Amino acid sequence: MPSDLEKAMESLIMVFHRYACREGNSNTLSRRELRELMENELSNFLKSQKDPGIVDKIMKDLDTNRDGEVSFEEFVSLVVGLSIACEQCYQVHLKKTGAQK
Ligand SMILES: [Ca+2]
Ligand SMILES: [Ca+2]
């Protein structure tokens, strides 16, 4: 039985490759693949962003080696960044619910 964390890592890899194999290099995300991934898998995050050019900005931030594609390594930094932001929200939520008692 895989643990929760092992399942989370597996999902991360599966999701990345599900989109990465759609066009061009099957091991990296093109701009369009990244957009599709974010629209489907990070739709709540995307909806919370007012900036219509957010995907392009994220693409630029993620593509550290400037080859115009997002590798798994580059993609992981997005997930880590969002996870840290989520964890901070969770802490705020815990404090709020704790204060109400
Ligand atoms: Ca690709
Ligand atoms: Ca790259």
Image (tube, rainbow, N blue to C red):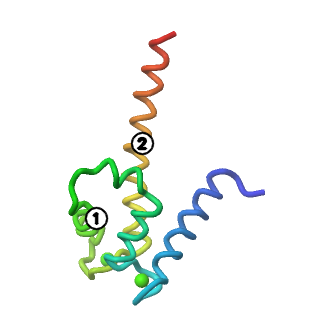
| Quarter location, residue 6 | bottom right
Residue type for callout 1: Val
Q: Earlier in the sequence, mark 2 or mark 1?
A: 1
Q: Position of residue 68 (x, y in %)?
A: 27, 80
Rendered view: 10 above or below 71: above
Q: Secondary structure at mark 2?
A: helix
Relative to 1, is 7 on the left or the right? left
* In front of the other: 14 or 77: 14
Q: Which of pointers 2 and 1 indicates the residue nearer the eye?
A: 1
Rendered view: 81 above or below 18: above
Relative to 33, is 11 on the left or the right? right
Q: Secondary structure at mark 1?
A: helix
Tell me if mark 2 has few (under 14), some (14-19) or many (20+) residues whose alpha carbon lies within 10 angstroms of its own.
Answer: few
Residue type for callout 2: Cys
Q: Position of residue 37 (x, y in %)?
A: 43, 68
The residue at the far top in this view is 101
Which image quarter holds the N terminus? bottom right
Specify the label residue 4 is tagged with: none
Specify the label residue 86 is tagged with: 2
Residue displayed at 46% across by 82% down = 27
Residue displayed at 39% across by 77% down = 29
Residue displayed at 27% across by 76% down = 65
Residue displayed at 21% across by 63% down = 53
Relative to 25, is 65 on the left or the right? left
CB at mark 1 closer than 8 A to ligand 2? no
| Quarter location, residue 36 | bottom left
Specify the label residue 55 is tagged with: 1
| Quarter location, residue 63 | bottom left
Tell me if mark 1 has few (under 14), some (14-19) or many (20+) residues whose alpha carbon lies within 10 angstroms of its own.
Answer: some
Ligand 2 location (quadrant): bottom left
Q: Position of residue 82 (x, y in %)?
A: 39, 50
